[in-house]
Image (cartoon, rainbow, N blue to C red):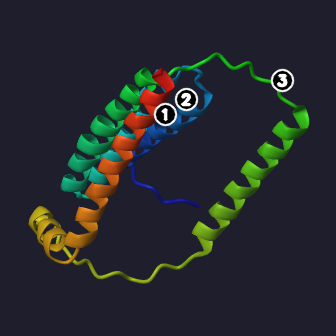
Amino acid sequence: MFNIAITGEFVAFFTLSAIMICGAVLMLSLEKVVHMVISMAAVFIGLAGMFVLLEAEFVAFVQVLIYAGAVSILMIFGIMMTKHHAVEQEPSKPLHQTLAAIAAISLFGILFYAIRTTTFPEQQQPFQPGEDNTMAIGELLYTGYVIPFELLSVLLTVAFIGAIVIAKKEAD
């Protein structure tokens, strides 16, 4: 039925997929927020590995640098700056769990069917493998997208200042 050759790329894909899925499940199921952030960082690192498999080394580097590094550290600082009170969870209801399981399985089935039946057109690669894509990304970012890039940096700065103000109000 399936004619699959077991290659190093195939093994790396499934290893990285397992890391990402385990990290995502752990993030949803762990109770300590710091442990959640660490499992989220594992998902980000697995995604960076996927980018390496796609020969997008620059994007993988940025993924590790920005998301696995900076965002995770920022979230840990945010957790440490705010007060957290223990919240008792109400007992889970079996009807809700059953409906959630049915919804998840249905979503998986719909997505699986959609992916298997979709025919994708041949794409022309804008970059040839082995080329220096970093230079092309930099030129495109600083010529065609310089205004959105600068607006994003202002937005992130305002969000960070807002988070500090909110944390200060809670401390007082």
Neighbor class of circle 1 (other Cα within 10 Å; few <14, some 14-19, many 20+) is many
The residue tagged with tag 3: helix, strand or loop? loop
Quadrant in which the N terminus is drawn: bottom right
Q: Which residue is mark 3?
A: 91
Residue at left 45%, top 56%? 4
The residue tagged with tag 1: helix, strand or loop? helix
Q: In this image, 59 relative to 5: left or right?
A: left
Q: Which residue is mark 2?
A: 26
Q: Quadrant of residue 160?
A: top left
Give the image location of residue 113, x and y in percent: 66, 66
Residue at left 83%, top 23%? 91
Quick check: marks 2 and 1 in contact, CB under 8 Å?
A: yes
- Mark 3 and mark 2: Cα distance apart in space: 20 Å
- Mark 2 and mark 1: Cα distance apart in space: 5 Å
Neighbor class of circle 2 (other Cα within 10 Å; few <14, some 14-19, many 20+) is some
- Residue 50 visible from this viewpoint: no
Q: Amino acid at mark 2?
A: Leu
- Considering depth in this image, is 3 or 137 the residue closer to the camera? 137
Give the image location of residue 164, x and y in percent: 38, 34
Q: Quadrant of residue 76?
A: top left
Q: In this image, 50 relative to 143: left or right?
A: right
Q: In this image, 83 relative to 149: left or right?
A: right
Q: Which residue is mark 1?
A: 23
The answer to whether residue 170 is above or below residue 152 is above
- Residue 100 visible from this viewpoint: yes
Q: Amino acid at mark 1?
A: Gly
Residue at left 75%, top 22%? 89
Q: Residue furthest top?
A: 86
- Considering depth in this image, is 9 or 72 the residue closer to the camera? 72
- Sequence-wise, the earlier of marks 3 and 1 is 1
